[in-house]
Amino acid sequence: MTRPSSVTAIYPGSFDPVTLGHEDIARRTLRVVDRVVVGVAETATQAKQPTFELEDRLAMLKEVFRDEPRIECVAFSGLLVEFARERGASVVVRGLRAVSDFEYEFQMAQMNRELHPDLEFIFLTPDVQMAFLSASLVKEVSRLGGNVSRFVSPPVMRRLHARFEEER
């Protein structure tokens, strides 16, 4: 397989909210590709009720990656493989925290490769300090009044605080 002159990767997810673990994966992906498109899924592949609206999730991502011109943040709906085609991406990157993540991600990758055989899938493990981190845990701790500033960027922390302050 010949490597294209410029390689674009899609990093899809719900990013509800974006964590430092997500940021780590996106930034480290730039070590192996030229450009990363962070794709914020309009609808989750797993049954989850989002805490933040799509526009808010997208705004948070754009804010945390504003210093990196090679990372573009956009929303998408529909099939991931179609989104990858539209963006000219040849790679999809996903983060794996645990063995349980692998089984799900492996199934998704296999299905997507059936739909788009030229698409490659790269799985990155997070920094060891972020291996336990999930957006769900961050939301739950924040919802209960805990300090999650070690797990999210300041702009995300402000939005979490504002969001859950409304509920208290």
Image (spheres, rainbow, N blue to C red):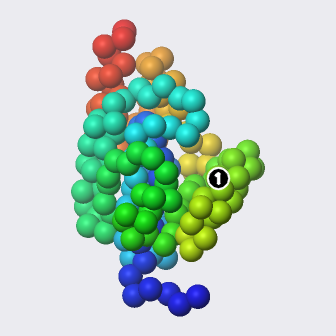
Name, please, the residue furthest toward the bottom. 2
Mark 1: which amino acid? Answer: Met
Rendering coords of residue 137 (x, y %): 55, 31
The answer to which of 147 and 119 lies nearer the viewer is 119
The answer to which of 11 and 78 lies nearer the viewer is 78
Decide if residue 28 is on the left or right side of residue 125.
left
Residue displayed at 33% across by 63% down: 71
**In this rendering, does residue 156 appear at all?**
no
Identify the image quadrant of the N terminus.
bottom right
Identify the image quadrant of the C terminus.
top left
Looking at the rendering, which quadrant does residue 126 occupy? Answer: bottom right
Q: Secondary structure at mark 1?
A: helix
**In this rendering, does residue 84 appear at all?**
yes
Name, please, the residue furthest toward the front. 115
* Vertical relation: 120 (above or below) 160: below
Decide if residue 48 is on the left or right side of residue 143.
right
The answer to which of 112 and 165 lies nearer the viewer is 112
Mark 1 lies on residue: 108
Rendering coords of residue 45 (x, y %): 55, 40
Residue displayed at 38% across by 82% down: 6
Name, please, the residue furthest toward the top. 168
Rendering coords of residue 63 (x, y %): 26, 48
* Vertical relation: 124 (above or below) 137: below
Residue displayed at 56% across by 57% down: 94
* Vertical relation: 146 (above or below) 4: above
